[in-house]
Image: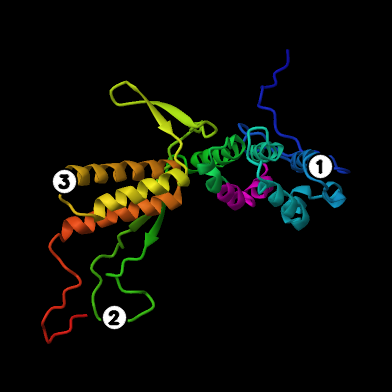
Amino acid sequence: MSDETTTAPAAVTTAAGDQETESSTTPNKPHITWSDSYTKAHDAIQSLTSILPSVPPSLSSSETPASCLLRDSETAAQISKLLRQPDSGAGDDNLCRWLYDTFQSSEPELHLVVLRFLPIIAGVYLSRVNLHKPLAGFEAVLLALYSHETASRNGQSITVNIPDLSHSSIYHETNKAAKNSATELNLAVISPTLEPYGTVRSMKRGQSSVAENGENGDLNRRIHLPWELLQPMLRILGHCLMGDKKDEKLYEAAIGAIGCLYERTLHDLNTKAMLATGSLLQLVKLASESDNVDYTEITESNTITL
């Protein structure tokens, strides 16, 4: 038996030609070497060749493939074109799967490659939400980004320090004595704390109706409301609101119906319907605030009020 003490194995980095070894300062985390980064980036490029029509050979032959992939405009244009295709974003979309797997790597430059296409993914996803089509591919990529941001913040919100204008600037002379030697911090929250989510709640966008439980335990049916069906409904409700208010029950029922439609448009993210129903609710609010005001009446006064 030897008297040697057992220690944790040190991470070894082998350089071509001179066989160097160095100890890892963080033994609990895997030591990422240049060869590891090269291998991950090279594997990502090889996987991309089966998705894109053509990949420049210079990406695979480069000594820094991740950096070249990030800056290659031809490859970025091909990825952007595929993301904008009408059938993109589905659960079996190979490009979305590649983006998801690439972001799961621990290589920072590969993270930037995926983040480069975040505006396109978010824009296409939001424009297709009201089409009631399955977009599991886009949702998986967005969820991976959200989970990474949640873990990076460690339950903290993003804040910024706002200068206190009650204290004199150090670049200007003043005759006033300082109120307090320690300047109080004025924090403004840019982004609140993110709640961790592991899944995206399916809204069953591919079906014509969604079964949901009501408040009393009964089963309600959420029918599909296209603009062709919603437009005549809004016209009828508009006539009920702007017509004669002799029938109070009809007026109150119209207000309740518009409120329900407004909540539904918010749920479906239908921007055109949100604008229409919101405008009708604004008319109801204005009518309740000034029932006896006639804006067409000309008042007799010599004073012009601006």
* Picture layout, residue 83 above or below residue 219: below
Q: Which residue occupies 71% across, 47% down?
A: 82
Query: Is residue 157 shown to the viewer in this render?
Result: no
Element under label 2? loop
Magenta residues (range):
107-124
Element under label 1? loop
Q: In the drawing, does residue 303 fall left or right of residue 100?
A: left
* Picture layout, residue 225 above or below residue 71: above
Q: In the drawing, does residue 32 fall left or right of residue 265?
A: right
Residue 196, percent from left and from top: 46, 35
As drawn, the residue found furthest toward the top would be 1
The residue lying toward the viewer, choosing from 148 and 15, is 148
Q: Earlier in the sequence, mark 2 or mark 1?
A: 1
Residue 119 in the magenta stretch? The answer is yes
Q: Which residue is mark 1?
A: 49
The 10 Å Cα crowd at callout 1, few under 14, some 14 to 19, many 20 or more, is: few
The 10 Å Cα crowd at callout 3, few under 14, some 14 to 19, many 20 or more, is: few
Query: Is residue 278 shown to the viewer in this render?
Result: yes
Q: Main secondary structure of the magenta part?
A: helix
Amino acid, disc 3 = Glu
Q: Quadrant of residue 186?
A: bottom left
Which numbered marker is on residue 248?
A: 3
